Image: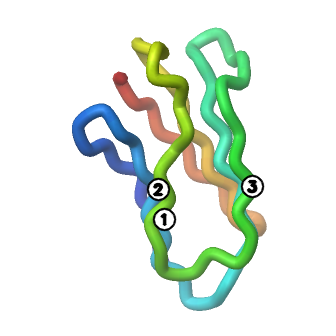
Amino acid sequence: SGIEISQQGENTFVNFNLEESANCIISVYNPLGQLITEQVKLAVENQQVKLNVPEDYSGIMVVSVQVNDKNITKKIFK
């Protein structure tokens, strides 16, 4: 089972490859720890989710993905 945060051009994606369906929260923060956007997804399993980051945002963002008791964080440059 896996969760991968990846960037393709201007877009950032979270790829889910889970053994069973789970709820997740995807949060994106700026370097100061302020929340830029948050998405709650119900019942993800094997799918790709595109992050809803404002088009005018640029710089470092911290993407945090929480699924059950797992939390994965990655810094992305946009």
Q: Which residue is mark 1?
A: 3
The answer to whether mark 1 and mark 2 are in CB contact below 8 A is yes
Q: Residues within 10 Å of mark 1 (few under 14, many from 20)?
A: many
Q: Residues within 10 Å of mark 3 (few under 14, many from 20)?
A: few
- Vertically, is 37 above or below 13? above
Query: How many angstroms separate mark 1 from mark 2 (CA)?
Result: 7 Å
- State the image coordinates of residue 78 (x, y, percent, origin top left): 36, 23
Q: Residue at x 70, y 48 (%)?
A: 39
Q: Earlier in the sequence, mark 1 or mark 2?
A: 1
The answer to whether mark 3 and mark 2 are in CB contact below 8 A is no
The one of 51 and 26 positioned closer to us in this rendering: 51
Q: Residue at x 41, y 13 (%)?
A: 59
Q: Residues within 10 Å of mark 2 (few under 14, many from 20)?
A: some
User: Which amino acid, mark 1?
Assistant: Ile
Q: Residue at x 62, y 51 (%)?
A: 65
Q: Secondary structure at mark 2?
A: strand
Q: Secondary structure at mark 1?
A: strand
Q: Which residue is mark 2?
A: 14
Q: Which mark is residue 40?
A: 3
User: Which amino acid, mark 3?
Assistant: Val
Query: How many angstroms separate mark 3 from mark 1 (CA)?
Result: 15 Å
User: Which amino acid, mark 2?
Assistant: Val
Which quadrant would residue 23 be assigned to in this image? bottom right
Q: Residue at x 47, y 51 (%)?
A: 50
